[in-house]
Image (cartoon, rainbow, N blue to C red):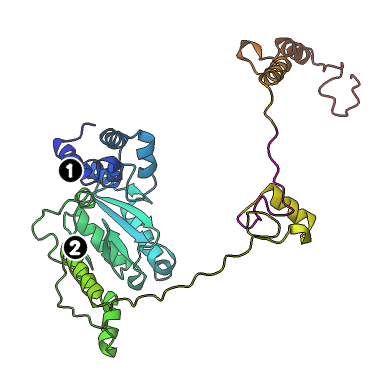
Amino acid sequence: MSFSETTRTRAREIIARYPADRSRSALLPLLHLVQSEEGYVSPAGVEFCAEVLGLNKAQVGAVATFYTMYKRKPTGDYLVSVCTNTMCDVLGGQKVYDTLAEHLGVGHEETTADGKITLEHAECLAACDYGPVMTVNYDFFDNVEPQAALDVVEELRAGGRPMPTRGARLCTLKEMAVQLAGFADERDGAVADGGPGEPSLRGLRLAEQHGVSVPGFDPKTPIRSKAEADRAAAEAKAKAEAAKPAPAPEPAKTAEPAEPEAATGSTAPDVKAPDDKSPQVRTAETRQPDASTPVPDAPGIKVPVDGPAPAPRDARAAEAAGVAANPPAGDGKPAGDAAGAQERNLKEAESGTGADGADPADASGTGVRK
């Protein structure tokens, strides 16, 4: 498939968001971008992403198959996901799914004949306090019951766009993929609706009821830009440094007498000889020294060193002996794959006798012919 010029322009814009030596970080939004044109990530979409990022198709495919939001086969305009994980299942999620599957005549990751609805099981939609939940293109329908779910899909098939319980107005999967690629939803009033659900506000309500608040926090404080915040932090740090009292001068130190040289005459720190250790520990430390092992010239320690390297003529002689003892197999066949043995085995199989003249069908192991 040849992707549109709009898609190619958007691809260049996505790649420009990242440093030149980190362009492969653009792969996730690019996969959403190709899905916005085709409705799924096709082999052509994988090839397109690999081409614009300078990757191979295996690298792109590995990412596309890892995340469930990238669909690998054509998907309907509306992806209906029903949570059937533990909490929602207990509350009736499986019944909602079964009702939709029977009504639509499709199963998991299957699409209706009109191309409108793709149905799927979902493993936890992270909304347990609203269960059972269903999403349409990742927008939530909370506390859903079988009949309510049927009403939603029928309205979708009729061309309507029911309002989610939480979130903005519904859009198609392709329109959603454009947003996931990092572009704004251009529909008029697309994000004008929606709002948080009551369970999400429960913590805030309890905080207000019991007078719990963050010390010194004013909710009307405007959010500063990063540059303003960095400047304010630098000014606060400078004020703190200026307010610090000047450090008092340190008293002059008297010279301390030098420690006498170790009686052993070693330049290393005086450590206890390891003779008190077991032979096994001492041997292990000698073979594999670590930070706690006494230094090499401490008393009682001797670190082994490698012996002299073999002379070149000795190495050549050993190599020649190895080559002579391991002749390469002829005709590119594995060692031991001799034609004579094969012919003998074929003749024995045709005559019905083994190498010792016994009938192969004789299971007694006696080797006596019948």
Give the residue displayed 29% in from the left and 86% down from the top.
212
Give the residue displayed 72% in from the left and 54% down from the top.
299
- Location of mark 2 (residue): 226
Outermost residue toward the left in this view: 188
Q: Quadrant of residue 47?
A: top left
Secondary structure beneath label 1 = helix
Name above or below for residue 204 compared with residue 332.
Answer: below
Q: Nearer the viewer, residue 178 or 244?
A: 244
Secondary structure beneath label 2 = helix
* Amino acid under disc 2: Lys
CA separation, marks 2 and 1? 24 Å
Q: Quadrant of the N terminus?
A: top left
Tell me: 327 left or right of 31: right
Q: Position of residue 75 (x, y in %)?
A: 29, 46
Q: Quadrant of residue 170?
A: bottom left
- Location of mark 1 (residue): 13
Q: What range is drawn magenta here?
A: 291-307
The answer to whether one can see residue 201 in this image is: yes
Tell me: 73 left or right of 290: left
Give the residue displayed 26% in from the left and 43% down from the top.
30
Q: Is residue 160 magenta?
A: no
Q: Nearer the viewer, residue 300 or 35?
A: 300
Residue mark closest to the camera, 2 vs 1: 2
Q: Is residue 299 magenta?
A: yes
